[in-house]
Amino acid sequence: MRVIERLRLDTISSTYISGGEILPVLDCISLTVKEGEFVTVIGPSGCGKSTILRIAAGLIKPDQGEVYKDGAIITGRPQLVGYMPQQALLFPWKTLKQNAALPLLASGTAKDKAYEKVEKMLPLFGLDGFANYYPNQLSGGMKQRAALLRTMMVDSNIMLLDEPFAALDALTRGKMQDWLMQIWEQFKRSVLFVTHSIDEAIYLSDRIYVISDRPGKNAIEQKIDLPRPRRIKVLATAEFANYKQLLYKALE
Ligand SMILES: Nc1ncnc2c1ncn2[C@@H]1O[C@H](COP(=O)(O)OP(=O)(O)OP(=O)(O)O)[C@@H](O)[C@H]1O
Ligand SMILES: [Mg+2]
């Protein structure tokens, strides 16, 4: 089978300018996401992970390097991709269903059809029965799942997820990881995922890029060869521990 490259960041360097100061953020970063692949970026706070996702979505034009989506250059041109920012917000005056349906409505789907599609997905996201709730009537975890559902509703073969579970307690987080994996296995989207958690990265990923402290550079790239579907017990295996040690070393 031919492997299609969904996304490629090729030797990307990027700076921010604030208060007249130039802040180098990314230094010659390269990464790829193949079709159906789950790829994670991990690195210390401030190393430029969120910036990588913004560049991948075409929201920021880097100083150097190109971004390719399905083989075409898209550098600095906003794309229709499922992008869930680090602080994903729901509109407080819209219900869960209305929030989640936004990408569908924006791409011209009729309201009835859009709501129907969202309603069908609610059980999978653990949100069954909450379609007409407003964000302030949902728990933190439910809000994050709703934001994830909205991201899924974007008709795109790639999802960019920026620490979607960071604010959750360990138990809810574990559940959400399993949800995400189930959804990923079912829908076969390519995912570029950002996290601080080494365990989460190993558990979810096919490949992991470790990025060094700012300005972010490629430190190591690690393939995760744990069998799929993965279940929680894989965390207790020797292979998992080996990967963990490797990644801790790379992050030090
Ligand atoms: N809009 C901006 N203007 C100026 N500087 C910015 C802007 N966004 C980010 N930065 C700076 O760029 C650097 C990288 O930020 P970024 O958000 O990409 O890091 P990160 O790796 O996602 O961090 P975290 O793990 O804390 O989310 C930081 O030093 C930050 O202060
Ligand atoms: Mg970030």
Image: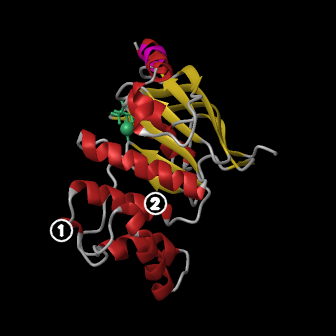
Left or right: residue 2 compared with residue 124: right
Pointer 2 local density, CA inside 10 Å: few below 14, some 14–19, many at least 20: many
Q: Position of residue 187 (x, y in %)?
A: 58, 58
Amino acid found under the numbered disc labelled 2: Thr
Q: Is residue 170 above or below residue 98?
A: above
Residue stretch in magenta:
244-248
Q: Is residue 146 above or below residue 238?
A: below
What predominant SS class does the magenta segment belong to? helix
Left or right: residue 18 compared with residue 73: left
User: Element type at marker 2?
Assistant: helix
What separation in Å lies between label 1 and label 2 (alpha carbons)? 20 Å
Say which mark, if any, is on residue 151: 2
Dividing the picture into quadrants, the one containing residue 97 is bottom left
Residue at x 48%, y 70% (from the top left corner): 103
Which residue appears farthest toward the right when viewing the image? Answer: 1
Of the numbered discs 1 and 2, the one sitting upstream in the chain is 1
State the residue position of label 1: 137
Q: How is the image coloured?
A: secondary structure
